[in-house]
Image: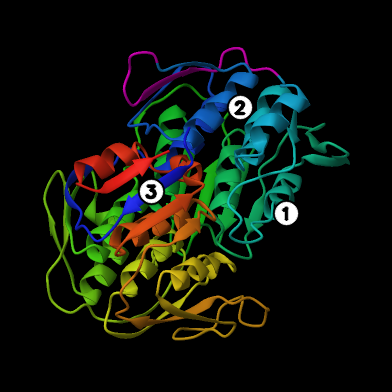
């Protein structure tokens, strides 16, 4: 796979494309298959490297996966789940943080699980201590070993009462995947309630789980003795849809995103409209375009759902470089997510980072030494540069900046973008982008 993209920018992106299943749901639904006593069918699966990584991890544990001649469809047979070799898990885990989510299902199926050193995008601490804490509350025993962590459940897993210090998506997923087969009732407070979480709950309910989502971020799970398979169409990827919308705005283009859904994107659509972007919604998707007038600056902050999603922030910042005046972005979810703006400065953007909580309410990073607020001055014409992708969302944001910039850019490390953006080079072709891969 080539890892350099040479982009001749300054051309409006015009055309249509399709987004399929959400990266943040598909991998978790695949893990849920470990809990099943029958085959599972997952539809709307995108061709992204994260799906290949999770497929490899599941196959190491004895899950048979068939995707032959089925575009966007996976058949998963977990009948013969087995413990994988430590070295094999470690070879896969450098590219993904999914192995930690296998723990609950593997403890139910095999009585033990293993966590190697974890990879993922370097956008903040993203510690696994939340995961380990909740697994211990279910009755898991965690042993530190030189090659990683070994988990066992000598007395089985039992339901418990958990209150998260922060509504972490990953930890909420961990609780769900563990509690559904634990003995008794689990009550989770301060849970994440993102659309992808609710879609995972829908998958688990199809399998036979008993889960209720109550008010004030409370989720209750009644453990059951067995779970069957599922047939599920994944929720569309709202992150990818928002990324292409920002590309339309930054390049003064017009992009129809087939599969984009209004309800899951309401926080994004409100901000898009405030800036001065236009959109039109129909039953098949959403059309995003630059209305031709002056774009407006704004003050906003990221937050857990139903707030403005942190994964929308980076592509939005690129669009904000083209707005008139000063914009303030306060990042409250990941402490280091604004580091990508350094390369935007090399392209002509004027972005200053601050440690203070600017423009919004104080957040958990306010007393720490993290530059988690950005002030963007615009509009500033962007110029081509040589830049290197820092992480998945930052990488796509660099791609947007290169497409909006005058002149030629070389974007290194684009293999990271394949983790979450399906067939993005084909989609660039459909939008009339001028680029070369090599």
Label 3 vs 2, first from the N-terminus: 3
**Magenta stretch, residue numbers:** 68-82
Q: Residue 207, how many percent across, how many down?
A: 45, 28
Residue 18 lies within the magenta run: no
Report which residue position mark 2 lands on. Answer: 57
Give the alpha-carbon distance from disc 2 to disc 1, as whole Å: 22 Å
- Quadrant of residue 253 in the image? bottom left
Image coordinates for residue 315, horizontal then vertical, percent: 37, 62
User: Quick check: marks 3 and 2 in contact, CB under 8 Å?
Assistant: no
- Mark 1 or mark 3, whichever is nearer to me: 3
Residue at the disc numbered 3: 6
The disc, 2 or 1, on the residue closer to the chain's N-terminal end is: 2
SS at badge 2: helix
Residue 28 vs residue 323, the one in the foreground: 323
The correct choice, above or below, for 293 with respect to 7 in the image is below
Q: Which residue is mark 1?
A: 129
Q: In the image, is 422 to the left or to the right of 52? A: left
User: Residue 339 in the image: x percent, y percent?
Assistant: 55, 68
- For label 1, the crowd category at 10 Å Cα-Cα, with few meaning under 14, some 14 to 19 and many 20 or more, is few
Give the SS element for disc 1: helix
């Amino acid at each position: 796979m080539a890892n350099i993209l040479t982009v001749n920018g300054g051309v409006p992106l015009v055309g249509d494309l399709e987004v399929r299943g959400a990266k943040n749901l598909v991998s978790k639904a695949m893990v849920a298959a470990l809990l099943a006593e029958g085959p599972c069918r997952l539809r709307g699966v995108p061709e992204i490297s994260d799906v290949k990584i999770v497929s490899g991890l599941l196959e190491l544990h004895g899950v048979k996966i068939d995707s032959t001649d089925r575009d966007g469809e996976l058949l998963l047979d977990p009948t013969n789940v087995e413990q994988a070799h430590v070295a094999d898990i470690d070879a896969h885990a450098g590219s993904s943080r999914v192995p930690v989510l296998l723990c609950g299902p593997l403890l139910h199926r095999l009585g033990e699980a293993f966590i190697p050193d974890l990879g993922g995008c370097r956008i903040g601490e993203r510690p696994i201590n939340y995961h380990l804490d909740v697994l211990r509350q279910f009755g898991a025993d965690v042993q530190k070993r030189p090659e990683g962590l070994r988990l066992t459940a000598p007395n089985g897993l039992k339901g418990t009462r958990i209150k998260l210090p922060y509504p972490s998506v990953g930890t909420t997923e961990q609780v769900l995947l563990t509690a559904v087969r634990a003995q008794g009732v689990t009550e989770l407070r301060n849970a994440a309630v993102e659309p992808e979480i609710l879609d995972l709950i829908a998958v688990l309910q199809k399998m036979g789980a008993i889960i209720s989502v109550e008010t004030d971020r409370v989720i209750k799970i009644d453990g059951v003795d067995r779970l069957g398979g599922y047939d599920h169409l994944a929720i569309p990827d709202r992150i990818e849809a928002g990324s292409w919308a920002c590309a339309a705005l930054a390049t003064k283009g017009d992009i129809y995103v087939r599969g984009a859904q209004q309800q899951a994107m309401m926080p994004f659509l409100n901000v898009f409209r405030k800036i001065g972007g236009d959109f039109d919604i129909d039953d098949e998707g959403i059309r995003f375009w630059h209305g031709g007038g002056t774009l407006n600056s704004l003050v906003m902050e990221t937050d857990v759902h139903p707030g403005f999603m942190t994964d929308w922030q980076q592509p939005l910042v690129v669009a904000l470089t083209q707005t008139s005046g000063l914009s303030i972005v306060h990042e409250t979810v990941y402490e280091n997510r604004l580091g990508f703006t350094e390369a935007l400065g090399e392209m002509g953007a004027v972005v200053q980072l601050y440690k203070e909580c600017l423009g919004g309410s104080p957040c958990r990073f306010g007393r720490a030494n993290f530059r988690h607020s950005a002030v963007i001055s615009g509009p500033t014409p962007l110029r081509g540069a040589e830049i290197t992708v820092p992480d998945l969302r930052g990488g796509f944001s660099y791609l947007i900046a290169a497409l909006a910039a005058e002149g030629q850019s070389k974007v290194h490390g684009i293999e990271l973008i394949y983790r979450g953006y399906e067939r993005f080079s084909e989609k660039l072709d459909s939008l009339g982008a001028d680029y070369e891969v090599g």
